[in-house]
Amino acid sequence: MATVLVVDDDQSLSRLYSDKLQKEGFTVFVANDGVEGLEHALSEHPDLILLDILMPKMDGISMLKELRTDSWGKSVSVIIFSNLKEIENIDEVRAMVQEYVVKVDIRLNDLVTLVKR
């Protein structure tokens, strides 16, 4: 089954996503900030990255931009999964990801369906 990297500084949400995705058969890695997320992404090469925006050390947009400079990272699937409905340069960010999902607008089972797609 596919591997998923969850990058989110909210550890309770990360655990929730990780547990649910593992029950669905995914291998899941978790990172608590953008620096750790970038390191995991480049070393583990997950099939999909669920990426929050607001995080310590390195925010999700910065991590995404760094990731896209790597030969492997430029094509990995990324879903932005954030509480921010509006961000600066949203069109630029949407062009770099498969989906932009607002956490409060989606149920956990819908997230699983999205990840499976």
Image (cartoon, helix red, strand yellow):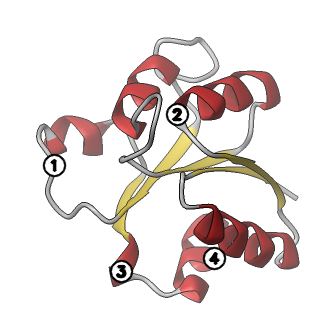
Q: Tell me whether the residue at label 1 lies in contact with that at label 2, contact meaning CB atoms closer than 8 angstroms.
A: no
> Could you say where residue 62 lies in the image, as x and y percent from the top left?
37, 26
Disc 3 is placed on an element classified as helix
What residue do we see at 79% from left, 23% from top? Answer: 43
Q: Tell me whether the residue at label 4 lies in contact with that at label 2, contact meaning CB atoms closer than 8 angstroms.
A: no
Cα distance, mark 4 to mark 2?
A: 22 Å
Above or below — where is 106 with respect to 63?
A: below
Above or below — where is 51 with respect to 37?
A: below
What residue do we see at 51% from left, 22% from top? Answer: 67
The circle drawn on residue 112 is: 4
Classify mark 4: residues with Cα within 10 Å, few (<14), some (14-19) or many (20+): some
Cα distance, mark 4 to mark 3?
A: 15 Å
The residue labelled by disc 3 is: 104
Which residue type does callout 2 highlight? Gly
The circle drawn on residue 34 is: 2
Which residue type does callout 4 highlight? Val
The residue labelled by disc 1 is: 87
> Could you say where residue 56 lies in the image, as x and y percent from the top left?
45, 38
Disc 4 is placed on an element classified as helix
Which residue type does callout 3 highlight? Val
> Which of pointers 3 and 2 lies earlier in the amino acid sequence?
2
Classify mark 1: residues with Cα within 10 Å, few (<14), some (14-19) or many (20+): few
Q: Quadrant of residue 12?
A: bottom right
What residue do we see at 47% from left, 12% from top? Answer: 69
Cα distance, mark 3 to mark 2?
A: 21 Å
Cα distance, mark 1 to mark 3?
A: 16 Å
Which residue type does callout 1 highlight? Ile
Left or right, 19 with reference to 60? right
> Which of pointers 4 and 3 lies earlier in the amino acid sequence?
3
